[in-house]
Amino acid sequence: MPYKRVRKGKIQWVVDIKTQEERITKIFKSKAEAVEFEVKTKKLIKARASTNTVSLLEWSEKYLDFCKDRMTERVWQEKKDALKRMFEGLDPDWPVENITPELAMKKLQQRRDETTGYQANKDLVHLKAAWNWGQKYLAGWPQIPNPFNLPKFPYKKWTKYVPPMDDVKKVLNVMKPKDKTMLLFFLHTGARRSEVLNLKWKDIDFANNQVWLTTRKRRGGMEERDPVPLTQELRQALLKLRAESGQYEYVFVNKEGNPYKDRSSWLPRACKKAGVKTFRFHAIRHLTASWLDAHGVPLTTIQRILRHRNSHTTARYLHELRGVQVDLDAIFSGQPEKKAKVLEFPGGQKKASGM
């Protein structure tokens, strides 16, 4: 509020406003004028400050836009859901500095109580990354510590169920030819679900007995294509499928000729029909890895075939593995006693022996 003072026998009303950037002092003859000036000035300061502060809505929208073309749809959706849960019940116009460690912990504990510590930790990872991105790329971001630098929640780690090969064979026996080909593709290539659902006929090189799989599960969301050899069994199944539905762009399509979007219930239904314990897409990838390992394939070669990077894998390491392939026919031919033959090809040529 303005304060009164006397100078040379005259009454003055002084307005003295301090901000972090400046100090505004002005003298008026009347209190009314001083009050009016102070109110207007504080409104201007507040408006100016708000234009330099990032809101929760602005932060989330810009971060999700950034991630849209750099990550898989599943990861992008996880990030969107994590931000939505964090902001639930909060004013979208709130400045981001209103997110305190205490508030973040409260929201994440609620997520933990409703689901598991594992799910809360996934949200924590996404939120921490979102804050770090805003701090790096958004003007007006507050220079305060990341409120999501919180300890992870403990959780019980469940062992992934990997079906025995006999169960997979039972499922294959009850499937129609098109579905059988799809399951064989998962099994013989170790492909991820998105790689199979998005597979196009142009990605299959029958002449060189290989298929090119595209993934975005790389740092930065860059798309990368890697060749995987075709076994004779899978090659023949794909050739037959192409003769029946090769007019479509995608390899695996529904009755309308459109690529599948999910097929999450497909394997559980087939498992029930075959009378075996339910397994899902990623379990097949694990089975492929374990089957390769059981046949004496080196760990580094398995990582190359599965095209997988963990936190310790580098681009240089992957380059060292280029040109290394394994005779997958020796593994999937029904001869478990036969050791796989690892072949080296100069210049990174990708071709498996006997194909």
Image: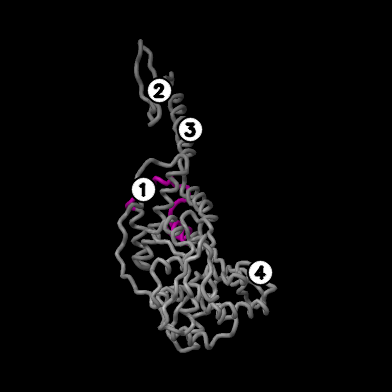
For disc 3, the marked residue is 44
Viewer-side residue, 40 vs 203: 203
> Circle 4 is placed at which residue position?
249
Residue 248: percent from left, percent from top: 67, 72
Q: Residues within 10 Å of mark 1 (few under 14, many from 20)?
A: some
Stretch in magenta: 78-102
- Mark 4–mark 1 Cα distance, whole angstroms, equals 46 Å
Comes first in the chain, label 1 or label 2: 2
Front disc: 2 or 4:
4
**What element does badge 4 sit on?**
loop
Q: In the image, which is nearer the foreground, mark 1 or mark 3?
A: 1
Inspect the image, locate mark 2, and give the three-letter code of the amino acid beneath it: Thr
Is 187 displayed left or right of 122 in the figure?
right
Rendered view: 299 above or below 291? above
Could you tell me how far apart the alpha carbons at marks 1 and 2 are, in whole angstroms? 36 Å
At 50% across and 70% down in the image, what residue appears?
191
User: What residue is shown with label 2?
Assistant: 25
Task: Give residue 202's position: percent from left, percent from top.
Answer: 63, 67
The picture places residue 143, in percent across and down from the top left corner, at 38, 40
Q: Is residue 187 left or right of residue 199?
A: left
Percent coordinates x, y for residue 290 in the rendering:
40, 75
